[in-house]
Image: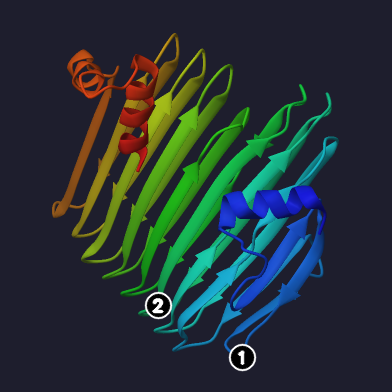
Amino acid sequence: MNEITQKLLKLVSNWDGMFQGAYNIREDGGCAGRQSSANVHISSKTDVPGLDIRILPGTAGETVSIPACVTHGDIDDLVYNDFYVGENADITIVAGCGVHTENGEPARHNGIHRFFLERGAKVKYIEKHVGTGNGDGIRSIDPVTEIHLAENAVMEMDTSQIGGVDRSTRTTNATLAAGARLVIRERLLTDGEETADTQFQVELNGQDSAADIVSRSVAKGASKQSYTSTIIGNAPCSGHSECDAIIDGSAIVDAAPKLCAHNADAALIHEAAIGKIAGEQILKLRTLGLTEEEAEAKIIEGFLS
C-alpha cells in the first residue's frame, strides 16, 4: 500500500495498521491485500472487477472490511461486490471509500454492492466516504447498493459522506420478505460547489416487513443536495422515511419523500424538515465563550452525530 492509501484507510475504516478478521483492500483498481477467515470466504470475480464474499450460516461476531481507495487523478474505478450471507449469520461489514487527487485530473470510485441475506441473517453495514487532496480534479464517489432480505433477515446500514467529495450519486434499492427489517442512517456534509444526490427505493413485499430510513444532512457554501425516497408497501407492513437538513450560505436542498401503499394494511409515514441554524442556538453557545464560527461547527457536529 502507498502512503495515501494508508491515510485514507484511517479516515474511512479506522485502520490502525491492520484489520481484524477477513478483509480486502482495493487500491487504484487493484488488490493491495486480502485475507479470508474460516467463516468468511473472499474471492475475485472472473467476469467483472470485484469480489464474491460468502459468509457461512451461523457465523457470529466477525467483521469483514472491504475498503477502496483511489490515490491519484485519472482513475475511474468500477467494482462489483456481492455478499452472500448465510442463514442466521450475524456479521459487521465495513466498506469505506476514499478518493484523492492532487492535480487537475478527476478521481472516481463507483462501488456496486449487492447483499443477499438468507433467512434470519443479520448485517451491520458501515460505509464512510471522503475526498482529499488539493488539486482541481473532480473527486467523485457513486455508490450503488442493492439489498435482498429473506424472511426475518435484518440489515442496518450506517452510511456517511464526511467531506471533500465534489460529486456523488448515492443509490440504494431494497426488497424485503416477510418479517424482514431494514434500518438506514445517512449522514451527509457538502460545501463549496459540491453536489450530492441520494436516492432510496424500498419494496416491502412480505407481511410484517419494516423499513426505517433517516437522512441528516448539512449543505454549506454554494453546494447542492437532493434527496428522494420511495417506500412501496405491497403487504401488511410498516415504513418510515425522514429527511432533516440544515442550510448554510447559499446552498440548495431538495427533498422528495414518496409513499406508495399497495395494501390496505401498509402503514407508511414520511417526514421532511429543511432550515438554517436557529439564532438562539448560536447565541446560547456564544454565551459559553464560543465564537460564532465555533458555535456553528459545534451545532453541525451534534446534528450529524
Q: Residue 56 carries which label?
A: none
Mark 2 or 1: the one toward you? 1
Circle nearer the N terminus (2, 1): 1
Q: Is mark 1 on a helix, strand or loop?
A: loop
- Quarter of the C terminus within the rendering: top left
Contact, CB < 8 Å: mark 2 with mark 1? no
Residue drawn at the location 31% of the way across and 37% of the way down:
302
Question: Which residue occupies the foreground of this view, 294 or 50?
Answer: 294
Q: Where is residue 243 in the image (x, y as percent from the top left)?
A: 31, 34
- The answer to whether 78 appears left or right of 293 in the picture is right
124 shown above or below 69: below
Question: Percent from the top left, x then y, of residue 234?
Answer: 28, 55
Q: Is 103 placed above or below 173 here? A: above
Provide the secondary structure element on which disc 2 rests.
loop
> Which residue occupies the foreground of this view, 141 or 32?
32
Q: Compared with residue 7, is residue 89 higher up or lower down, i.e. above or below?
A: below
Give the answer, above or below, for where 294 lies relative to 241. Answer: above
Task: Identify the image quadrant of residue 21.
Answer: bottom right
The outermost residue toward the front is 289
Which of the image's four quarters has the N terminus?
bottom right
**x and y percent of residue 76 in the render?**
79, 41
Task: Tell me the residue that label 1 is attached to.
Answer: 38
The front one of 80 and 206 is 80
Residue annotated with mark 2: 121
Identified at 64% across, 37% down, the residue is: 131
* Residue 186 screen position, x and y as percent: 40, 44
Q: Could one spot residue 214 in this view of the protein?
A: yes
